[in-house]
Amino acid sequence: MAGIVVKHREYSYRSGDKKILVPSHTEKHDPHVETQAEYYVAFELERHGWDVGLPLRRTQKGFDLYAEKNGCVLRVQVKGRSSERGINHLPRDPRRSFNVLVCVLLQGRRRPETFVVTAEELKDKFRHKKTDNNRWNPSSERKLYLERWDKLEDLRRARSR
C-alpha cells in the first residue's frame, strides 16, 4: 500500500452543465512512515533514559506513547514525515492531548531528524491565531527544536517541584 490520499476540503465550479469538485488541499498519508517514526522516537526515549509504553488505541486519543522517568509520566505525540512539509490540524489547546510533540523527518538512508516541541510552546505559538487549521513547520525553526530531547528533562523537573 503506497498511501492514502486524504481530502481536507474541496470546492466546486460549473463547467457547462457539469459540477466539478476540486480538492483544495490533499495530503499523502503513509501509515508506514508513522509507524517507523513511533519506533524511532521510542528508541530515542529509551536511549535518553525514559521508559516507554504504548497506550491502548481505542481508549487513548491524541498521543502515541507514554514516557516515564522517576515517577513522571509524559504523553508523547509522534508525527512522521518523509518530506519537509509542515504538520496540519494541530489542536487549539494541545496541552489537553499531549505534553510533547515529536516530528520525525525520515529521509531515506540518512539518519532521521527529530524536532521536539512541548505542548506549552505550541499553545503560545498559536495563541493569537483565530483559525482551527493550525500549521507548524518544524524545519523552518531548526535551532529551536532540532534534537531537543532536553525539553523532556525540563518538563520532568518542573513537574517534580
Image: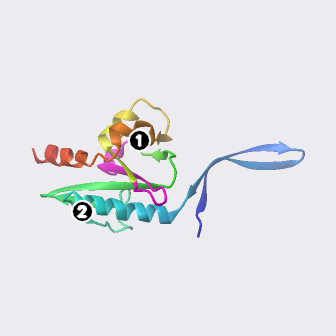
Residue at the spot x=30%, y=63% of the render?
43
Q: Is residue 79 magenta?
A: no
Q: Which residues are magenta?
A: 93-112
- The mark tally for this picture is 2
Residue at the spot x=50%, y=64% of the render?
31
Which quadrant: the N terminus?
bottom right
Which numbered tag is attached to residue 40? none
The amino acid type found where label 1 is placed reads Arg
Residue 63 vs 119, above or below: the answer is below
Q: Is residue 103 magenta?
A: yes
Q: Position of residue 158 (x, y in %)?
A: 15, 43
Q: CA distance from mark 1 to mark 2?
A: 30 Å
Q: Which residue carries the number 2 mark? A: 46
Q: Which residue carries the number 1 mark? A: 92
**Label whose residue precedes the other's in the sequence (1 or 2):** 2
In this rendered view, identify the residue nearer to me: 61 or 48.
48
In this rendered view, identify the residue nearer to me: 124 or 86.
86
Which quadrant: the C terminus?
top left
Residue 80 image-quadrant placement: bottom left
Callout in the foreground (1, 2): 2
Going by the picture, which residue comes out furthest to the front? Answer: 109
- Lateral position of residue 24 relative to residue 121, left or right: right
The amino acid type found where label 2 is placed reads Glu
Residue at the spot x=31%, y=55% of the render?
76
